[in-house]
Structure formats: C-alpha cells, structure tokens
C-alpha cells in the first residue's frame, strides 16, 4: 500500500477545498448540526447542497458515468469524503445510506432498469433511501426478521414492522429486507425489495433520539402492494445481498477527517485558554490526552485508507470494514470524552448558554457518538466478524 498521494490527487484535494469554500451555505455553518441533529431547515439546506454536489458528479464520484458518477478512483473518492467531513459540509448519514450502501448493492444485484432509475437518482442527489432492516425482535440477529412479503399476482404484499429506520420520514424509497419463505432456514428465506415510501399502507411514527431530535422512526407495513419488478436480485437470496450492503455500510470513511478538525479546534482552545496564568496546554495530563487522541485518530485514518486501497485494487473489504468501524467509533467517543474533560464544566453547557464553548460541540458529540458503534451492527457484532472472518476463530 502506498501511503502518499500523487501530485494530481493533491491538486484534486485543493480543487475540492476551493469549491467547498464557495458552496457550503453560511447558514448551514451557523446552524452547525452534527449527526442526527437535523431540523426542517437544515434538511432543506443539506438536500440542496447534495443535489449541487450530485449534479457535479461528486456525490458518487466513483460510480460509472452511465449512472451519474465520474468513475474517479477510490483514492479521489476518499479525498472527497475527507474534505467534505473536515469542512463540515451538509452531508450526513442519509448520503451514506443512499450513495455508499444501497447504490453499490443495487449496482451489483439490480436489473438494468433499477440501476438506471435508482442508482442514477442516488448519484444525482435526487433520491434518498432508508434502510428497512431492524425490527423490534431482530437487531443483531437480523436474520430473525419477520416482516413478510407474500406473492399475489404481479405484486408482493408486505406486512410487518421495522424500527430505528433513519430518515424514513424524508426518504423516497426503502431498501427493505423481508421474509419471502418462512419454511427454510432463516438466512435462506429473505429477499430485498425496493418500496416507494408513498405507497398506501405505510405508517411512519417518529422516535426521538438522544439529542432530542427526530432522526429515526418506526415504520409499519399493512398490506402494502409492491410490484414484483421491485424485487432486487434473486428471490430468497436477500441475506447475501444485505450482507454485501452491510459491508459497504461499515466501510464508511470520513469520521477520522471530521475528528481531525475537532481535535485541531480542541488543541487551539487548550493553547488559548488560561487558568492561574498557565494555558491548559501546559497541563501534562491534558497534553497527554490530546496527544493520545491525535495518535489514535491517525490510526483510524490509516484504516480508512486501507479500505479505499482495497476497493482500488478490486478487493471487497469485509472484516477490514468491521475493524475500521470498531476503531473509528471508539476513537470518536474518545475525542468527545477528552473534549469534555478539557472543557470541564463549560463542556456541559448547551448551545443556548452564553458560556457554551465551541457551540457545545463536545457535549453533543458525546451523546451522538454513542450511536456510531451501534447503527450498522454493534461493536460486539463487528468483533465477532473480525474473530470469525479475520482471525478464523470458530463460530461457537
Ligand atoms: C443511530 C442509529 C441509527 C440506526 N438506523 C437504522 C436504520 O436506518 N435502519 C435499520 O434497519 N436499523 C437502524 N438502526 C438499528 C441498528 O442496526 C440496531 O440497533 C443494531 O443492529 C442493534 O440491534 P438492537 O438494537 O436490536 O440490539 P440487540 O441486538 O438487542 O443487542 C443488544 C446488546 O446485545 C449485544 N449482542 C447481541 N447479540 C450479540 C452477540 N451475538 N454477541 C455479542 N453481543 C451481542 C449487542 O452488541 C448489544 O450490546 C440504527 C441504530 C442506531 C443507534
């Protein structure tokens, strides 16, 4: 693996930076939402920005040109992801879901019609997906899912309930995992189906998250009729397709770049803030903590780079994505905690307080970062994957 960027790649990074300087809306930066903190206003701003990015070809830069991408290398895709995250562009999990998880799975398993409609729509920023995986009794043990899809003429009739469905209230379509055969081992009777979220029979109920925002939902399906043409890939082969999409999900890059920016701000704060005539940065305990998050974050970045490199070589990361996810989620929590310790009681103040430091970023990040080692499979499940697929340990 080559750790250096080429001259051309560095020039591309510069081009992205310049573009972002012009295009990230000022109002978005003032609002400063972090993950899972969308409001109606921030959602509109972010969707406008994403469409602009999509129509430039930079939302899904590595996609084939025929599906709205630019066929850029995975290294350039990584550079874009880093710059978007570092510059706090209006890109969040909805883009990850649609562009980096569902889109690639559709490219592998979808029909030509599905690809030209959905993959292109996703690449242009015109279509948002939500993920219909988890159910009240199927989270880590996802293969136990009970939502049924029963054939009836040219349709599937869907009945069941999903939970924690991020952005279902905004999404155009759902990438749904449903049981199409209840009489075979549980992994073998699941199919992936695309559902228009405006179809009659779908009820969306909000769930309020730890940050007191509405980001995820319960979704109920009551006799929802979906054309059979919306089945993706082979019937009852959904578990395999879903597992591929989850690998895409877990290989997300960008957190390390976002952390990098936050660490830089924290270091600046520690240098500028004085107690008893000395700056916080002179305190050996604080220096130690800051150094350790800087080093750990660099390791996370290298893990992200490894994933990009594997894609660039035509490999499909599997346990490597899980490694990256575990490490990145834990370092993100660590950054948030070191921030809280460094700020002392100021860190506990909400954005409304005039004494709040850095827009209360660390307190919000502390709450938000709990979700990072959960969505897409908990860190315990990732460790199981690393043990089995990476270390070759027995399943039981
Ligand atoms: C912010 C956020 C967004 C989400 N968005 C979506 C979404 O858009 N769509 C969607 O479908 N789902 C979504 N989820 C749901 C997420 O995928 C599940 O929460 C996750 O898979 C865990 O399932 P669970 O909550 O049922 O917990 P459980 O599976 O009940 O797990 C409870 C605890 O037991 C541990 N555990 C369970 N099994 C094992 C095992 N075999 N070995 C070791 N430990 C184990 C877990 O690690 C966990 O600590 C989201 C979750 C979060 C937090």
Image: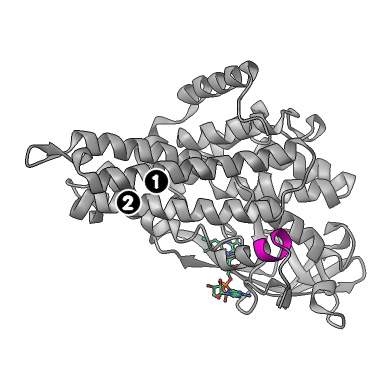
Vertical order, 125 against 236 (above or below)? above
Question: Dividing the image into 4 quarters, which one contains the C terminus?
Answer: bottom right
Residue 362 vs residue 70, the one in the foreground: 362
Measured as percent of width and height from the top left, residue 26 is found at 39, 30
Measured as percent of width and height from the top left, residue 235 is found at 89, 65
Q: CA distance from mark 1 to mark 2?
A: 8 Å
Measured as percent of width and height from the top left, residue 94 is found at 58, 49
Q: Can see residue 353? A: yes
Circle nearer the N terminus (1, 2): 1
Q: Can see residue 89? A: no
Measured as percent of width and height from the top left, residue 248 is found at 69, 50
388 is within the stretch colored magenta: yes
Q: Quadrant of ligand 1?
A: bottom right
- Mark 2 near ligand 1 (CB under 8 Å)? no
Q: Is residue 22 left or right of residue 263?
A: right
- Mark 1 near ligand 1 (CB under 8 Å)? no
In this figure, which residue is indicated by the disc labeled 2?
A: 338
Q: Is residue 79 left or right of residue 22?
A: right
Marks 1,2: beta carbons within 8 A: yes
In this figure, which residue is indicated by the disc labeled 1?
A: 293
Instruction: State the colouring used for the structure image.
Output: one colour
Vertical order, 224 against 329 (above or below)? below
Residue 25 vs residue 322, the one in the foreground: 322
Vertical order, 71 against 393 (above or below)? above
For label 1, the SS is helix
Vertical order, 306 against 246 (above or below)? above
Q: Residue at x 38, y 49 (%)?
A: 335
């Amino acid at each position: 693996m080559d750790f250096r960027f080429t001259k051309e790649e560095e020039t591309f990074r510069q081009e992205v930076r310049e573009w972002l300087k012009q295009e990230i809306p000022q109002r978005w930066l003032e609002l400063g939402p972090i993950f899972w903190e969308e409001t109606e206003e921030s959602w509109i701003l972010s969707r406008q920005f994403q469409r602009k990015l999509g129509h430039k070809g930079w939302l899904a830069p590595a996609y084939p040109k025929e599906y709205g991408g630019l066929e850029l290398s995975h290294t350039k895709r990584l550079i874009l992801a880093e710059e978007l995250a570092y510059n706090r562009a209006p890109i969040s999990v909805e883009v990850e879901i649609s562009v980096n998880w569902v889109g690639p799975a559709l490219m592998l398993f979808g029909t030509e019609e599905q690809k030209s409609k959905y993959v292109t729509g996703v690449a242009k920023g015109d279509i948002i997906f939500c993920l219909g995986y988890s159910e009240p009794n199927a989270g880590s043990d996802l293969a136990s899912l009970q939502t049924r899809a029963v054939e009836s003429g040219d349709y599937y009739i869907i009945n069941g309930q999903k939970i924690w469905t991020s952005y279902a209230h905004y999404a155009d379509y759902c990438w749904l995992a449903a049981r199409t055969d209840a009489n075979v081992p549980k992994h073998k009777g699941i199919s992936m189906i695309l559902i228009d979220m405006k179809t009659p029979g779908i009820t969306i109920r909000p769930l309020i998250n730890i940050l007191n925002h509405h980001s995820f939902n319960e979704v109920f399906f009551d006799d929802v009729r979906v054309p059979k043409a919306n089945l993706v890939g082979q019937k009852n082969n959904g578990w395999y397709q879903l597992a591929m999409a989850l690998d895409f999900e877990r290989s997300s890059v960008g957190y390390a770049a976002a952390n990098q920016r936050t660490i830089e701000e924290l270091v600046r704060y520690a240098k500028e803030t004085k107690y008893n005539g000395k700056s916080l940065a002179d305190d050996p305990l604080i220096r130690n903590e800051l150094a350790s998050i800087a080093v750990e974050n660099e390791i996370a970045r290298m893990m992200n780079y490894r994933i990009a490199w594997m894609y660039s070589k035509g490999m499909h990361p599997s346990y490597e994505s899980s490694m990256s996810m575990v490490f990145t989620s834990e370092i993100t929590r660590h950054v948030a905690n070191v921030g809280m310790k460094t700020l002392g009681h100021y860190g506990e103040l909400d954005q409304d307080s005039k004494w709040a430091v850095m827009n209360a970023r660390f307190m919000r990040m502390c709450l938000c970062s709990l979700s990072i080692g959960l969505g897409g499979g908990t860190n315990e499940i990732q460790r199981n994957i690393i043990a089995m697929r990476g270390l070759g340990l027995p399943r039981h």
